[in-house]
Image (cartoon, grey):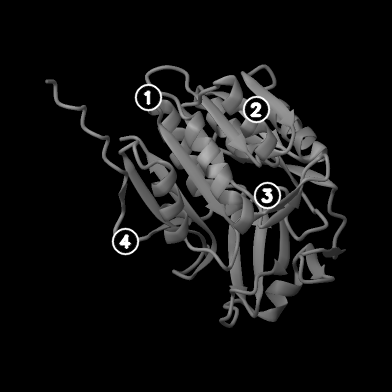
Amino acid sequence: MPLPAPRPAPPAIAAEPCVMRTGSWRDYALLDSGGGRKLERFGPWVVTRPEPQCLWAPRLSSEAWSEAHAAFEPADEDEAGRWKLHAAAPASWPMTWREVTFQARLTAFRHLAVFPEQAANWAWLSDRVRACAASPRILNLFGYTGVASLVCAAAGAAVTHVDASKKAVGWARENAALSGLAEAPVRWICEDARKYVQREVRRGARYEGIILDPPKYGRGPGGEVWRLYDDLPDLVSGCAALLAENPSFLLLNAYSERISGLALAGLLGEALAERGGRIDWGELALMEEAGARGVGLSFFARWSAG
């Protein structure tokens, strides 16, 4: 009587966290931080905006901070507010990271349509895609303005980019054109991420890599409500079902003060219990241009097949 096939090993979860640090590059720098704010350069423009985690005192003088071109003034605890301009800043301007060009914008939610701390993830994604033997299929959920999608496309992937915001998808397509990737194999889809994943599972679709960067709270184009703690487990389970027979990675990122990289790693470990591989986890941090201080901004867990 033949012996039953051995069950695949569960993923090995790293025993220690990893801090993925992003330093300055040509078009971005964290110039200073402290007093609950950050002083940053996006391309040629210097801005200040709130960051409650900056509990220490600023390193630079108040005069240096006052020379910023724009300062964000919050109106509520949900990050909404307005920008106070100290110079005639444009509505948008281009920035470049490696092969990808994208527009920075002064949005109404203190962000600039790009999250520079994600550069550490972009570098990792680019390496994973380039290591694939053939052009991998990548699914990017909550893809926002598309920088991660374009990084993967520039590295040779065929990408499906999904976001519930029609405006964000429009910005992502503009960024593709700026990057010379308008004709790259990228599908731009405006839809609720959960509905899209459920439909792809029914279709039997498969992807070699999945990027999952959900907000704490959001709404889909049909009014669907997204709550991170309620909805993330089912979505991660659906993503696990979409991984190809020989996948490369699943990257999960979350911006929430009530979650941890270890919690995200545990969730991936459960969903990928029969996939083997390795799960690394930790946080993303921006490092000041001068000195060793850094600001932790989000938590991540990433599964890799090998």
Do callouts 2 and 1 mark residues in contact (Cβ within 8 Å)? no
Label 2: element kind:
helix
Label 4: element kind:
loop
Quadrant assignment, res 65: bottom right
Disc 2 designates what residue? Answer: 199
Disc 4 designates what residue? Answer: 16
In the rendering, at what x and y percent does residue 64 appear?
Answer: 69, 73
Nearest-to-viewer mark from 4 and 3: 4
Q: For the residues marked 2 and 1, what is the alpha-carbon distance in whole angstroms?
A: 21 Å
**For the residue marked with disc 3, what is the amino acid?**
Gly
Q: For the residues marked 4 and 3, what is the alpha-carbon distance in whole angstroms?
A: 35 Å
**For the residue marked with disc 4, what is the amino acid?**
Glu
Q: For the residues marked 2 and 3, what is the alpha-carbon distance in whole angstroms?
A: 40 Å
Nearest-to-viewer mark from 1 and 3: 1
Nearest to N terminus: mark 4 or mark 2: 4
Q: For the residues marked 1 and 4, what is the alpha-carbon distance in whole angstroms?
A: 27 Å
Do callouts 2 and 3 mark residues in contact (Cβ within 8 Å)? no
Disc 1 designates what residue? Answer: 246
Disc 3 designates what residue? Answer: 43
Pick the front one: 259 or 10: 10
Nearest to N terminus: mark 1 or mark 3: 3
Do callouts 4 and 3 mark residues in contact (Cβ within 8 Å)? no
In the rendering, at what x and y percent does residue 44 appear?
Answer: 70, 52
Nearest-to-viewer mark from 1 and 4: 1
Q: Residues within 10 Å of mark 4 (few under 14, many from 20)?
A: few
Nearest to N terminus: mark 2 or mark 3: 3
Left/right of residue 44 with respect to residue 281 in the rendered view:
right
Nearest to N terminus: mark 2 or mark 1: 2
The structure residue drawn at horizontal position 27% and vertical position 35%, both measured from the top left corner, is 8
